[in-house]
Image (cartoon, grey):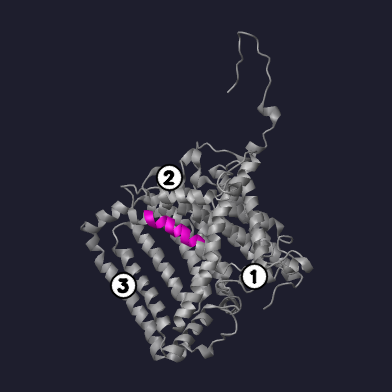
């Protein structure tokens, strides 16, 4: 029997309604994960050490992907883990550790400079907050906007299939376009950072393996007490 | 009460999976050393127990009784967390490995993605250990391994896409079932070779063991570790190697299927076949360790990005166009 996330939680729900008529298990898991997510999100900004911030960010990503799996979006949850935790956060960590910004952050926190940025931060966070309210309010007061029955969602399919069927049919152009944008930005980043440095010694792979014995070794007759002169 | 019954059922299942995995990790270390020794015309560990089978247990006992030293300038929490992370990640991925059509702890829809995600998290144990030690050699080892594992994950991901194109499902049991007629090692042989080499690099095995190259970096990220914490790194590493062998067996060698569906072979349970295939792959891993010299770092990166990635991408195009042209794409 295959179980996907949705079925798993339905099973647990059935179990709980059978015993307690409450969604206790579901709520316990949900609140645990979201509590971890919120606390670690706060710790990302609060912790003094930058490397610790990145680790809290990773914890945040992981608990968010657990939440994704809980609502049955297992594909998204796994992709979240692979892309954000497995690749993006590793690079993050890499940069933070290499640059050793831990000390810089400490100095910056206590300085006068940091207080200058408070208004900008406040403005941005209010904007995001208002956006969130609009989205959630729309959901709350106009539920037919997000009516599940209106969508072409087929519940007999696993969510990887249904995602694929939407992405590669209705939204194929947007999907391809986003791929193109990513490709262009990748090439752009390489072009911007690529520098031909002069005077750097390199080992040519091809030259190394195509060396023959005849050109590498030379047998010389050496006269006694004279030695040989080898060209360098 | 019903809750607790289900809870204990699951715990029993997990124990029945984890204890054999841990024991086999100990045995596999012995096998590794033995194969290595035989290639070099030595005897290897042969003193403790019959054929030296209990050598790993003796080693484990030694590690348990050794003192755990935590460097005073290290970041203590992360220093202790690192081996735990390595070990946990190596063990939780076994949850989705199917030992037969029914014997699997969690038969999830996105099994292969789960395995890929967990193996991509494996790098954190190493980075954490290397950074928290606050010492030069571990840090260099950690940076090397981070770069190496991220690079080779890309090609492993593309190889998995090749297999998924032929299967049409992310479920591991479906992947095994799809090889009923022919194991994927035959149509996708070049991909199997690349997968094997990438798996060596992903698990930091020789010839790609640069993160712990003893001639350059003492012991890489493990330098500052001692006692049980070192042993946990070591166990996690070998559990990861076993996992990679299991993944190879499932993706290319037909998982728990018997090689031919005729009478005496069909009697053997699927778990035995899977274990035999894992062992075969592991012996290959051990042989490679014994016969190939270590790569240079730039060669390693070149191999990953300039050879394996383009090759496996080209193979994706080939596979998908072949399947499309002959109308063989799986539909479900």
| Label number found at residue A11 | none
Give the secondary structure at mark 2: loop
Give the secondary structure at mark 3: helix
Residue B196: % across, % down: 63, 54
The residue tagged 3 is: A125
Closer to viewer: mark 3 or mark 2: 2
Badge 2 local density, few (<14 within 10 Å), some, or many (20+)? many
| Discs 1 and 2 share one subunit | yes
What residue span does the magenta drawing correspond to?
B79-90
Badge 1 local density, few (<14 within 10 Å), some, or many (20+)? some
In three-dimensional space, the C-alpha distance between marks 1 and 2, rounded to whole angstroms, equals: 40 Å
The residue tagged 2 is: B223
Q: Chain of mark 1?
A: B
Can residue B154 be seen from the camera position used here? no
Closer to viewer: mark 3 or mark 1: 1
Sequence order check, earlier mark of 1 and 2:
1
Residue at x 52% of width, y 75% of height = A74
Q: Chain of mark 2?
A: B
Residue B41: % across, % down: 65, 38
Is B176 rendered above or below residue B50? below
Residue B94: % across, % down: 55, 65
Chief secondary structure of the magenta span? helix
Badge 3 local density, few (<14 within 10 Å), some, or many (20+)? few
Is B158 rendered above or below residue B134? below
């Amino acid at each position: 029997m295959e179980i996907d996330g949705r079925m798993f939680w339905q099973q647990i729900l059935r179990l709980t309604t059978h015993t307690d008529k409450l969604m206790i298990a579901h709520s316990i898991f949900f609140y645990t994960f979201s509590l971890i997510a919120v606390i670690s999100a706060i710790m990302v900004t609060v912790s003094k050490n930058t490397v610790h911030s990145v680790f809290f960010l990773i914890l945040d990503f992981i608990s968010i992907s657990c939440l994704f799996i809980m609502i049955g979006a297992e594909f998204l949850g796994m992709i979240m883990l692979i892309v954000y935790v497995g690749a993006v956060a590793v690079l993050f960590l890499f940069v933070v550790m290499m640059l050793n910004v831990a000390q810089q952050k400490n100095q910056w926190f206590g300085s006068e400079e940091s207080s200058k940025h408070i208004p900008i931060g406040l403005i941005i966070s209010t904007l995001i907050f208002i956006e969130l309210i609009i989205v959630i309010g729309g959901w709350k007061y106009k539920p037919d906007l997000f009516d599940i029955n209106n969508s072409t969602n087929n519940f007999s399919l696993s969510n990887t299939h249904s995602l694929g069927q939407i992405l590669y049919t209705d939204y194929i152009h947007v999907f391809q376009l986003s791929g193109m944008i990513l490709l262009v930005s990748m090439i752009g980043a390489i072009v911007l950072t690529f520098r031909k440095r002069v005077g750097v010694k390199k080992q040519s792979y091809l030259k190394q393996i195509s060396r023959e014995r005849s050109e590498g070794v030379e047998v010389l007759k050496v006269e006694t007490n004279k030695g040989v002169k080898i060209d360098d | 009460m019903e809750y607790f019954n289900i809870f204990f059922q699951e715990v029993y299942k997990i124990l029945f999976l984890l204890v054999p995995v841990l024991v086999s990790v100990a045995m596999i270390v012995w096998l590794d050393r033995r194969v290595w020794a035989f290639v070099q015309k030595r005897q290897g560990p042969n003193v403790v127990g019959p054929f030296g089978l209990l050598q790993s247990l003796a080693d484990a006992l030694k590690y348990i009784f050794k003192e755990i030293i935590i460097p005073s300038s290290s970041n203590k929490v992360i220093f202790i967390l690192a081996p735990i992370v390595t070990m946990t990640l190596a063990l939780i991925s076994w949850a989705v490995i199917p030992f037969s059509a029914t014997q699997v702890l969690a038969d999830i829809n996105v099994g292969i993605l789960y395995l890929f995600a967990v193996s991509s998290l494996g790098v954190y144990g190493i980075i954490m250990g290397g950074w928290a030690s606050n010492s030069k050699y571990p840090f260099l080892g950690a940076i090397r391994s981070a770069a190496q594992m991220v690079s080779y994950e890309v090609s492993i991901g593309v190889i998995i896409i090749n297999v998924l194109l032929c299967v049409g499902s992310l479920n591991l049991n479906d992947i095994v079932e799809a090889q009923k007629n022919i194991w994927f090692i035959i149509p996708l042989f070049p991909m199997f070779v690349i997968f094997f080499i990438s798996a060596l690099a992903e698990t930091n095995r020789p010839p790609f063991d640069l993160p712990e190259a003893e001639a350059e970096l003492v012991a890489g990220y493990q330098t500052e570790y001692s006692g049980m914490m070192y042993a946990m790194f070591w166990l996690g590493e070998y559990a990861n190697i076993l996992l990679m062998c299991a993944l190879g067996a499932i993706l290319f060698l037909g998982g728990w299927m018997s090689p031919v569906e005729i009478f005496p072979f069909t009697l053997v349970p699927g778990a035995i076949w899977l274990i035999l295939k894992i062992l075969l792959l592991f012996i290959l891993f051990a042989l490679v360790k014994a016969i190939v010299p270590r790569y240079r770092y730039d060669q390693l990166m070149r191999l990953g990005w300039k050879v394996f990635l383009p090759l496996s991408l080209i193979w994706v195009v080939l596979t998908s166009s072949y399947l499309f042209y002959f109308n063989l794409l799986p539909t479900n």
